Amino acid sequence: MATGIKIAVVGGGLAGLAAAMKIAEAGHDVDLLSVVPVKRSHSVCAQGGINGAVNTKGEGDSPFKHFDDTVYGGDFLANQPPVKAMCEMAPAIIYLFDRMGVPFSRTPEGLLDFRRFGGTLHHRTAFAGASTGQQLLYALDEQVRRFETAGKVNKYEGWEMMSLVLDDHQVCRGLIAMNLQTLDLRAFNADAVIMATGGPGLIFGKSTNSMVCTGSAVSACYQQGAKYANGEFIQVHPTSIPGEDKLRLMSESARGEGGRVWVPKNPQDKRGPNDIPEAERNYFLEEKYPAYGNLVPRDIATREIFQVCIEGGGVGGENQVYLDLTHIPAETLTRKLGAILEIYEMFVGDDPRHMPMRIFPGVHYSMGGLWVDFEQRTNIPGLFAAGECDYSIHGANRLGANSLVSCVYGGFVAAPSAIDYAKNVERGSSETNGIHAAELKRQQEINDNLIRQTGTENQYQIHEEMGKWMTDNVTVVRYNDRLKATDEKLLELQDRSKRISINDSNLWATQAVPHARQLKNMLELARVITLGALNRDESRGAHYKPDFPDRNDERFMKTTIAEWSAESPILSYEAVDVGLIEPRKRDYTKGKAKAAATAEEAKKSGLPVPDGAAQVPTPYTEQKPQNVGREATWVKDGEKIVDGESFKELKDREREEKR
Amino acid sequence: MNEANVEKKRLENPPQTVDFRISRREKLDAPQYTETFTVPYRRNLNVISALMEIRKNPVTKDGKQTTPPVWSMNCLEQVCGICTMVINGRVRQSCSALVDDLLLAGGGNTITLEPMSKFPNVRDLTVDRTQMFDHLKQTKVWIELDGTHDLGPGPRMSQEDVQERYAYSRCMTCGCCLEACPQYYDDNYIGPQAIAQVRYQNMHPSGKMTRDARLEGVMGDNGIQNCGNAQNCVQVCPMSIPLTRAIYETNREATIYGLFGWLRK
């Protein structure tokens, strides 16, 4: 029995808190680092809900269908085993949050209510009003505070990770972080490190992400040898509210609850939207995709909206389309979508209950991230990753309401995996042999040089230019010549960033030094995203090249792996595990074509679908997850599962069976 | 379709530029002073984007090169609570403070930005609200889970109860209620936010089972009896949380517990 295990968790959003809670519950110590107080993490921005096939509506939903929808929505780029495991665990995750007191919306019977989201035909999304991420994050925040009070979790809020501490064998032994008030650097010794730092949206300048979502810490790992996978897959959310400082998200739940996207047939129509008769409106999504209508997956909705606007068909000929909820009673809207409608009203001024919203796509989520195996281990021993900062679940495109569940799943797998590793790792004398001090010194020198450095460049200007180039050329539609030009621009910006001067002579709590360090790291990741896109000559999920409009499974049903080198990212490709569901063409124009995952495949996956058509469940059984082959693979001691097989044994058996 | 006045009132004759009068402080306990910056007017400008503009090239209205003002920001959607400050004398989030609205309400073309006054002022417009999170520890606002393993669904609840709890669950610990509370100074009172969280957990069927521990958390020297019923909190709360209702209900519970609780021990 190993004693005194300490695990550092970097990031206090949903994934980080989920991992911290599991580790503390297993009796081990956690150092939890976060740039902002954990309760202010970006997870609060998730609006729509969390997916789990609970089948309360009697639609015959099952974890297998969730699995199939996720893999299909991700255009067959995700390794299937972890996706399957997530979908299996999803109902139990929702129930756990239910027990933690999340105020999920209810049915008249007092059961959990579910709504529909993009990319599925089932009501599978549990929600708490229209601010579900906030409630889920707070529930975990409360549980972690409970462990903090018990002395198991030490929070370091207002600390930013700068680098990993690696020993001579490239084994992770801790990390270096900076106190954002004093700029003091400190080495954190740890048996294992879990990265849970979220996405890199700020690389695109304005996005739906929070201001902490720079990807900086992940980029630091990448520059120290961690593999970065599928970087080019960036989700652009179809509906955001353009703003001066950011693009504010208009949740998919607006469409889930019946919101309709349209433009006036005459773009120059001067009438207000409410005065334009039905016959003169073009509901272009419903027309082209009768089965899914406004609820096609995000990449498709984004491209269609983008296309309409590029062709001059946007409202007033501008980059905007209407998202219309006015046909739904105002009272229903307030109850189901109040929080997001308030955001629109607050920042735009018009009341969406009575006036169609004007929206446009915005950068939203990175499907790519640190490469991890099926137990959330990166290629660096002792370094784990979970949540948006890992690449494992969403393939080429993420389905709505799958992010929250993937964050929690990632944290719940990473925690026991890290504990398992920490129990068995040879400690050596890493504390005394000076590797922490050496890395600390290296980081201090970087800071010192940065502060001394003089030049005429402005770091915020460089950030803006990077954002504009990335948004213009590396988002919805991609062309190879423009991608090449973007990479050249990024090289120029990297060069110019060596000549920035810190424009703040007061270093106490300054934003200038942290931002300068983030900028350098963002530029590195920007190249990974751009070159990954340049190399991938096909169209798949969120990655779309008009010159290569088809998916090319033969060449590119592969994970892109980027490894850092001083000159340029080194790209290689790894086969995708598609052993459970055979890849098929993605087509959302018809409802039936989608159901092509065969019963045989379902059986093989261990998640068989119910025989016959959807049935109304019998009373008192509808809250139980249907057809879950086994119980969720985690329990209190992090070892055993209910049917007597341990997590590790299970994984071993799965691996064995695969061979 | 509807004739309601649903279009936003806009500034009719917007000025060319807007002045921001900003409270500055170099570090904790250093003296406070103000500097004024001028930003070109743009429609849809909010306080944060104005600050970003100033940060890029910090020169005061009088042409003096200075340090960039420091403030906190994160989600910019008024859901993380971090960017709270006092704007034109009123405490609120700076991300959702639109310049147009501020000028419409205040007249003139100057906007003043000050840090919240009830918390340690770290630098310029940033404050340290650690004490608010400490109050959440003191009041034990969590459900005592048996464990995080799969034990099936939680208790059934009516949508009505859920809706009241949902209102409390939206508290983002921003501190507006404490800033506005006349009773709150030098961290002498756990304040409306912590009490609302007690109410939030005490309403839950499982949370009810450990209600007493939370009630004890609100009954100390810094507890609920410090409320002077000024009701400022509920007026400034950006999430429209029924704070006074939470105080009323919790106070009632605490009183009963204070009178008869010992019988159960």
Image: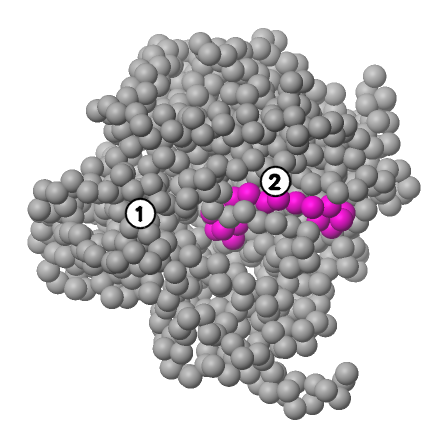
- Give the image location of residue A308, x and y in percent: 34, 30
Looking at the rendered structure, which numbered label has been put on residue B70? 1
Q: Residue at x 38, y 56 (%)?
A: B127
Looking at the rendered structure, which numbered label has been put on residue A411? none
Q: Amino acid at mark 1?
A: Val
Q: Quadrant of residue B85?
A: bottom left
Is A584 positioned to the left or the right of B87 in the image?
right
Q: Residue at x 20, y 37 (%)?
A: B57
Mark 2: few, some, or many residues within 10 Å (few <14, many ≥20)? many
Is B14 positioned to the left or the right of B189 in the image?
left
> In the image, is residue A376 above or below residue A3?
above
Is B257 positioned to the left or the right of A183 in the image?
right
- Give the image location of residue A294, x and y in percent: 47, 40
**Label 2 residue SS:** strand
Closer-to-camera residue (A563/A104)? A563
- Give the image location of residue A437, x and y in percent: 56, 29
Does the segment drawn in magenta span residue A41? Answer: yes
Q: CA distance from mark 1 to mark 2?
A: 27 Å
Q: Does the rendering let one see residue A557?
A: no
Give the magenta part as a residue range: A24-42
* Subunit bearing disc 1: B
Q: Does the rendering let one see residue A215?
A: yes
- Give the image location of residue B63, x and y in percent: 9, 42
Residue linked to disc 2: A9
Considering the image in quadrants, where does the N terminus of chain A appear?
top right
Considering the image in quadrants, where does the C terminus of chain A appear?
top right
Mark 1: few, some, or many residues within 10 Å (few <14, many ≥20)? many
Does the segment drawn in magenta span residue A306? Answer: no
**Label 1 residue SS:** loop
* Subunit bearing disc 2: A
Closer-to-camera residue (B46/A90)? B46
> In the image, is residue A306 above or below residue B142?
above
